[in-house]
């Protein structure tokens, strides 16, 4: 009888521990084996209708292709790399296997996951809405130094890292003006970045850049001349390759 009582007590303690673990905050659904996603959003130019449509569609496609347990971090690209800040750091809801007793006493069900995903979706919408309202025309857009620092902070070298960037990718910073960016040869720029220790730590990541192809001029977001578009494609491909990443660039997010 004593043995039975001890066993029941142990099971109750296990159930309480499991429930407490599931009640933990945003990181409770993290799976250390699941992909690690970093989404960088450029807020140095006001979002027009085309930007909003491309971003909402892109984030929706990213969200719908997640299985559960993935970590999602959203960071900003601003006028200086020191102003980049984290908007969100959460993991996608799912029910992790808990073994015989863990599954027996777990309160995690498909219904719980569905509700938690609704909460996450609502949070994403709120963050994007606030972003649309706060984005403004800034004198500079520091993409290079932001992308050299943020992945170092947010990357997980032992994971499947995926980097998404929503930006026109036109560098125009105190470090490197837009004029110099377009005028310099790719090889000279890469050498400069290597000297200044500004090549990214992409962790062999799959890098998806979307939102390119238009100028950043407020009220006149015309299509870029083909020569400048080719410059963006060639430079950023070399830039991410130097950091170990594989780049895909498009106006609208391509996940194929």
Image: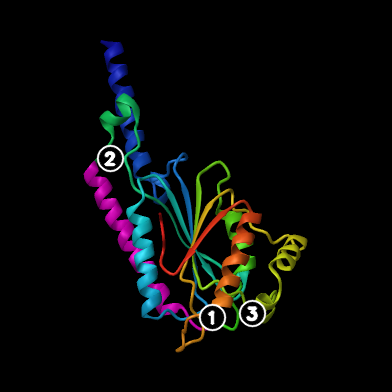
Query: Residue at image x 28%, y 40%?
Result: 108
Of callouts 3 and 1, which one flags the residue occurring earlier in the amino acid sequence?
3
Of callouts 2 and 3, which one flags the residue occurring earlier in the amino acid sequence?
2
Quadrant including the N terminus: top left
The residue pinned by badge 3 equals: 178
Q: Which residue occupies the foreground of this view, 162 or 73? A: 162
In terms of secondary structure, where does tag 1 sit?
loop
Quadrant in the rendering for residue 125: bottom left
Q: Is residue 149 visible?
A: no
Query: Residue at image x 48%, y 78%?
Result: 214
Mark 1 Cα shell of 10 Å, populated few (<14), some (14-19), many (≥20): few
Q: Which mark is residue 190?
A: none
Q: Position of residue 217 (x, y in %)?
A: 51, 86
Query: Residue at image x 61%, y 54%?
Result: 152
Q: Which residue occupies the foreground of this view, 93 or 210? A: 210
Q: Is residue 23 above or below residue 13?
A: below
**Majority secondary structure of the magenta segment?**
helix
In this view, the mark in front (1 or 2): 1
Q: Which mark is residue 225?
A: 1
Residue 181 vs residue 103: left or right? right
Mark 3 Cα shell of 10 Å, populated few (<14), some (14-19), many (≥20): some
Q: Are marks 1 and 2 in contact (CB under 8 Å)?
A: no
Separation (CA) of disc 2 from disc 3: 51 Å
Q: Position of residue 169 (x, y in %)?
A: 55, 71
Separation (CA) of disc 1 from disc 2: 53 Å
The residue pinned by badge 2 equals: 108
Residue 119 lies in magenta, yes or no?
Answer: yes
- What is the magenta range? 110-137
**Number of residue marks:** 3
Q: Are marks 3 and 1 in contact (CB under 8 Å)?
A: no
Query: Residue at image x 41%, y 60%?
Result: 254
């Amino acid at each position: 009888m004593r043995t039975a009582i001890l066993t029941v007590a142990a099971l109750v303690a296990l159930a309480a521990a499991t429930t407490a673990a599931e009640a933990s905050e945003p990181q409770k659904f993290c799976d250390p084996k699941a992909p690690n996603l970093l989404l960088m959003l450029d807020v140095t130019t006001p979002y027009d209708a085309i930007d909003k449509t491309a971003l909402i569609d892109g984030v929706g496609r990213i969200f719908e292709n997640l299985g559960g347990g993935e970590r999602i971090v959203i960071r900003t690209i601003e006028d200086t790399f020191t102003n980049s800040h984290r908007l969100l750091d959460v993991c996608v809801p799912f029910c992790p296997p808990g073994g015989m007793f863990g599954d027996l006493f777990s309160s995690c069900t498909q219904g719980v996951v569905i509700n938690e995903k609704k909460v996450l979706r609502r949070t994403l919408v709120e963050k994007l809405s606030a972003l649309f309202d706060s984005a403004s025309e800034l004198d500079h857009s520091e993409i290079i130094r932001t992308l050299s620092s943020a992945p170092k902070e947010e990357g997980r070298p032992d994971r499947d890292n995926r980097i998404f960037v929503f930006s026109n990718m036109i560098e125009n910073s105190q470090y490197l003006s837009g004029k110099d960016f377009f005028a310099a040869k790719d090889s000279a720029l890469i050498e400069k970045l290597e000297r200044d220790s500004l090549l990214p730590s992409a962790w062999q990541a799959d890098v998806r850049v979307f939102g390119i192809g238009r100028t950043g001029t407020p009220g006149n977001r015309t299509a870029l001349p083909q020569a400048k578009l080719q410059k963006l494609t060639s430079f950023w491909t070399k830039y991410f390759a130097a950091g170990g990443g594989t780049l895909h660039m498009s106006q609208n997010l391509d996940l194929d």
